[in-house]
Amino acid sequence: MAIPTSRTKDKAEIRINYEKCTVCGSCVNVCKDFSLKIVNQKVVVSDTPCFGCIACGHCMAVCPSDAIEIHGRMLSPDNMFVLPDIEKSTDYDELLALLQCRRSIREFKDKPVSEELINKILEAAKTAPMGLPPSDVNVLVLDSKEKVQGFATDYCNFLKRMKWLVSDWFIALMRPFWGKPMDEMFKGFVRPLFDIYLGNMDKGINLVNYDAPLAMYFYGSPYTDPADPIVAATYAMIAAESLGLGTCMLGGVHPLIQSGKKAKKFREQQGIKFASREGLFVIFGYSNVKYLKGIHRNFASVEAIPIHSV
C-alpha cells in the first residue's frame, strides 16, 4: 500500500515500453521515490522504493520518447499534455503588476460571474502544487449571489447556537490550556466577529461574505497536506484577477466549522465533505470600487542563515 489519501490508498503501476526506451535515465533522475533504476542498461521498476509510486507523473513528463506510462492514483497517459511555449507565459514584471493590482474587494457590482469564468478559475487552481498526489483538495462552489447569501444566513444561525464559545466563562476556562496568544485572539477578534456578523445580519447587512456573486471554499480531508487548500485558493485568486475579477480571502468561517457535533451538522447541510485542518473561503466578483494606489507590505522577518564552518 502506498501513501493513503481520501481518493486512493494504492500505489500506481509503472509501465515501460522497452521498444521506445533509449535508457537516457531522465525518468530515474526525476523519480524521488526511487521507484525506477537502471540495471544492465535497462530501466526497471525498483523493488525498494521509498513508498511506492505516488503518481506524480514526473517520469512521463520528462521522457523524450514516451516510453513510460503511469496508471493509477487518478493518473494515466490521457492526463498528459504538451507544455505551452515559454513565450506564452508571463514575465516577472507582468506577474508582479498583476499581483500588485490585486486588492481585497468587498464591494461588488450586482453582476453574476459566468460559468465560463468559474471554470477558468478552477482550471487554473487545479495546477497548484500539492504535497501528495492525487489532490485531496475539495472545492465548494457557490455560483450565485443567492447561494452566497443563503450560506451567510445559515452560518449566522449556526453562530447563534455557538455563542457560548466566546462567553467569558469559556474563555477563562480555556486560558490555561491554549495560552496567551489564543486568549488575545478570542478576545480581540473572534468575540467581536460574532457580534459583527450577527448584529449586522439582524439588520439585513451581510458581512460574512458581502453578497458576492461567487464564493469558493477550498478545504482538505484528514489526509491532506494542510498547505494544499491554501495554495489552491491562492492560485484561484490570481487567476480571477487576470480575468478582471476582484477577490477577497475570508478567514472568519473555516476555523469555526471544524469541531463539534453542531459544526459537523452544518458542514453536512452545506455539502462540505470533511473537517479540514486548513481551509479558505474566497469571494469573487466585479469590483464596484477603483483603487488608485497600492500598499507596500513586508514580512515579519527575512533572515539569511549564515554559513557555519566545520
Image: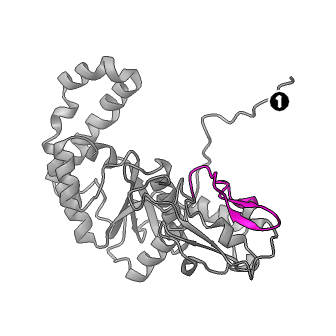
| Residue ranking furthest to the top | 176
Which residue sits at x=21%, y=33%? 165
Q: Looking at the image, which residue is at 79% across and 65% down?
A: 25
Q: Residue at x 82, y 64 (%)?
A: 40
Above or below: residue 192 compared with residue 158: above
**Residue 271, above or below 109:** above
Q: Is residue 28 left or right of residue 214?
A: right
Q: Is residue 46 above or below residue 296?
A: below
178 on left or right of 34 = left
Q: Is residue 147 left or right of residue 243?
A: left
Magenta residues (range): 29-52
Q: Where residue 270 sits in the image (x, y, percent)?
A: 22, 60
| Type of secondary structure dominating the magenta stretch | loop
**Residue carrying label 1:** 307
Residue at 76% from the left image edge and 59% from the top image edge: 29
Q: Is residue 98 magenta?
A: no
For the question of whether residue 199 can be seen, the reply is no
| Residue 126, image x, y percentages | 50, 68
* Circle count: 1
Residue 51 part of the magenta segment: yes
* Quadrant where the C terminus is found in the figure: top right
Local SS, label 1: loop
37 or 275, which lies in front?
37
Q: Which quadrant of the view contains residue 33? A: bottom right
The answer to whether one can see residue 138 in this image is yes
- The quadrant holding residue 172 is top left
Position in image of residue 290 (x %, y %): 49, 66
Between residues 308 and 215, which one lies in front from this camera angle?
308
Going by the numbered disc 1, the residue's amino acid type is: Ile
